[in-house]
Image (cartoon, rainbow, N blue to C red):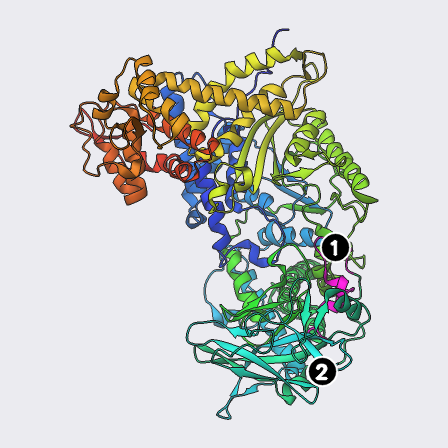
Amino acid sequence: MTEPRPTPMKRKLIEVALPLEVINRESAREKSIRRGHPSTFHLWWARRPLAAARAVLFAQLVDDPSSHPERFPSDADLINERKRLHRLIERMVTWENLHDDEVFMQARQEILDSTDGAPPPILDLFAGGGAIPLEAQRLGLEAHASDLNPVAVLINKALIEIPPKFAGRSPVNPEASVLRQGSWPSNTGLADDVQFYGNWIRDEAEKRIGSNYPKATLSDGSKASVIAWIWARTVTCPNPACGIRMPLVRSWQIGGKKGREAWVIPSTVNGIVTYRISYTSPSPNGSTTADSGTVTRTGATCINCSAAVDLKYIRAEGKAGRLGTDLLSIVAEGKRTRHYLPPSTEQIEAASLARPEDAPDGRLGYDPRAITAPNYGLETISDLFTARQLVALTTFSDLVVEARERVYSDAIARCDSTAERSETEKWSASYADAVALYLGAAVSRGADLNNSLVTWSSSRDQARNLFARQAIPMTWDFVEVSPFGGAAGDLGVALRTSGEAFAALPGGEPGTVSQLDAQTRQLQGLLISTDPPYYDNIGYSDLSDFFYVWLRRALRTIHPELLSTLLTPKENELVANPYRHDGKSGAHQFFESGFNGIFRRAREHAIPNFPITVYYAFKQVETNMHGEASTGWETLLDGMLSAGWSITATWPMRSERGGRMRDIGSNALASSIVLALRPRPASASQTPRRGFISALKGELPQALRELQQGAIAPVDLPQAAIGPGMAVFSRYSAVLNDDGSPMSVRAALSLINEVLDEVLSEQEGDFDSDTRFALAWFRQHGFEAGDFGDADNLARARNASLEHLERSGILSLRGTRGKVSLLAPATLDPAWNPQTDAYISVWEVVMHLSRTLTESGIVATSSLLSEVPDSIDRDLCKELGFLLFALAEDSKRTKVAIEFNALGTAWNDIVSGVVRPSKQGTFDYTRG
């Protein structure tokens, strides 16, 4: 059967080649950027890196040069234009260029040029933390964000809907004219008001409840502000002869900084446990060492009688409401240090407050995979907070309402007196609502550090927030931070960090944010770029209830339609939760039906000239509903195909730096995969298996060359190559096996990988004979020794001799008699001069480049490459590096794979540093 002719279309950059390594590098960098990052507005789980979202949107809209043969008729023209666009992406994703108007003006113009001046509006169906709609807005696009979860909706409003409405406006607070003169560009006026009224909330709260946080008395009698109180949960020892309130502690060490180490030392007198602080390492106390604590994953040990206490007993006591707390230490602020003080009666009594009667009482969701606190009796949201924390959070939340009224009054007073009264009131109310949203978000965000599941980092002398991961786990010793301590957990600190993020918001036209179910919302005329929840990775609604209750208390009069329910919506959340949908089978069916339904509807309303992009949260190995080994990756691809999509690209996006050797070459490095998809024509025909293989072999070589032209690491090439392979497979309505049955996605992926290996092997035909020998020998032996006779036969088959190969600097005939080994990069002569080498080969050049990169870095490697004669093709050197990585990874030569992956990853940077004199006496850059 003949292959169907693809619908004529302009290929987009994302469907051909991306500077993936730079995108991934900048995505990983964002993890360490806190000041000015929009994520500081409020926590959201599994937020997409801004750099990745920005690059994907740009490449989704901008034409690949191959779409314009009239402008780029030759391969060289295509390559150069692609490199130009890649350089723009590399500049665009760099954090330091976020405010470079020239870069973004150029990016927007490229988008306009590729969309006839009318780019489509962008929709993120599962907006979550807002990275995709925010970056759409930054690129000058009309941004639409929707989510079922009200916490996500409020985050997106704060990022893309509110700031543009008030950009360039002066603040309304009464001190604004004193604090700053002149104009208020971008969002600085709004940011100033958020800071001012937030400080008012903090100061007013300290007046009302500051007495609950008394200062600590130091050893010299002076007073110091308390940063934190370190508590331990307690349980009655089940030994009848003991019966003490035994503390449950992970570690007795509380200070870990060199020279300021500190430990809590417990002791028991007449059945009462007391605690003191030691700044010298104590000796073991009974069966429990000072460092190890008293509790493990299986149970606890009593510090008095050494009885082993099973975890089941602790759970039962917790469910019966019999877990107590003991104050272990007070952490006070000193001059460039922390003071660890023993408990005092004053500090214990200050924390002994009545719980507010109107504290939020919603129950925690049931999901023992991620929410384990209920197993120990912490079953409601209020149970996750001490009484003092509940008093503080309810006070702060209620003060947001009062602050909103102050903003409104001050806005009325600042408005133009000649304006219509109704317009003045309308604008003032809208502005007051906006400021209140940021204030409410700051209080809600602060709950992450103001709860009884916060732990203490002894190595950093500071508190660790609850949501270090996507879970609500049980903790034994915990930290209560001071909301007035001037450190993490203080509202003033939170306001400063979130205020800095205003500068990173792009402005432009206000985005549209809606609380809508992805399964029913309108899709017509909107181009999708989205990061959907994947299967059972994260239970967003159950986790977000933790924040929702505080947002609801502070903002329900402002956003009654969003915050009307006691907890976040659960019924239609697209997550495979077996505890909500009658077990694994029901959860699988619910998720698959909803997911496929959404993308089936999206297929019906697709804009034909553009691919949609979908992020997939990678999960390496999973089990399907029948208990069979499978991958979620296959399930996702199968769902997209059944919904009528053709897959045109798959890009591994890494926001983590893979440091473990065993991760090299595995998809464990990819935190997500981005797919580009186009509608498959309804007229698409079927093809037999041999037709599919023939098409693969015909198209994959060119696709591979295009992929390698981008700055892509060898480790990412196999995953990226699945894109063009699946483009062939998904072009057909079905690929038929020899027995007439439709080929599965798993079988297609296997064939794609086989053909990819063949294509990589066929690249060997372009190499010189010395390199072809070395490759064949490396495939069998790596850099280890093999038999002389085998090597001699292999060399003769390639019209070479071992003596010649030794003179060429490729192998060694010395050592054990009758043995031959390739020379590893580390064994090569660092004084090698490529200009005087009479037997130079691609293999030898790549070995020396790898050695130089490992020993001396990119600059030295560029310098060495500049000395290599023009007879050595740079593209072949790059291809060899990729091929060697694949061979080393397949044969489990991990260290070697890492070195060649580094060479492939750095190749574009190496080449860009090579400047060679041209015949005209000017300079040009070596083609890479």
The residue shown at (60%, 11%) is 690
Label 2 element class: loop
Looking at the image, residue 568 lies above or below residue 909: below
Q: Position of residue 210 (x, y in %)?
A: 63, 82
Which quarter of the figure has residue 372? Answer: bottom right
The residue shown at (46%, 47%) is 659
Which quarter of the figure has residue 796? Answer: top left
Tag 2–tag 1 contact (CB < 8 Å): no
The residue shown at (60%, 28%) is 611
Q: Which mark is residue 82?
A: none
- Quadrant into which the N terminus falls: top right
Q: Position of residue 548 (x, y in %)?
A: 72, 59
Q: Which one is nearer the viewer's eye here, 625 or 488?
A: 625
- Quadrant into which the C terminus falls: top left
Q: Position of residue 472 (x, y in %)?
A: 69, 59
Estimate how packed mark 2 is, as few (under 14), some (14 to 19) or many (20 or more) residues with alpha carbons within 10 Å: few
Residue 366 in the magenta stretch? The answer is yes
Label 1 element class: loop
Looking at the image, residue 267 lies above or below residue 513: below
Identify the residue under disc 1. 368
SS assignment for the magenta stretch, majority: loop
User: In the rendered structure, which segment of residues is drawn in magenta?
Assistant: 364-389
Identify the residue under disc 2. 352
Q: Which one is nearer the viewer's eye here, 372 or 487?
A: 372
Extreme bottom residue here? Answer: 221
Q: Amino acid at mark 1?
A: Pro
Residue 434 visible in the picture:
yes
Q: Position of residue 200 (x, y in %)?
A: 60, 74
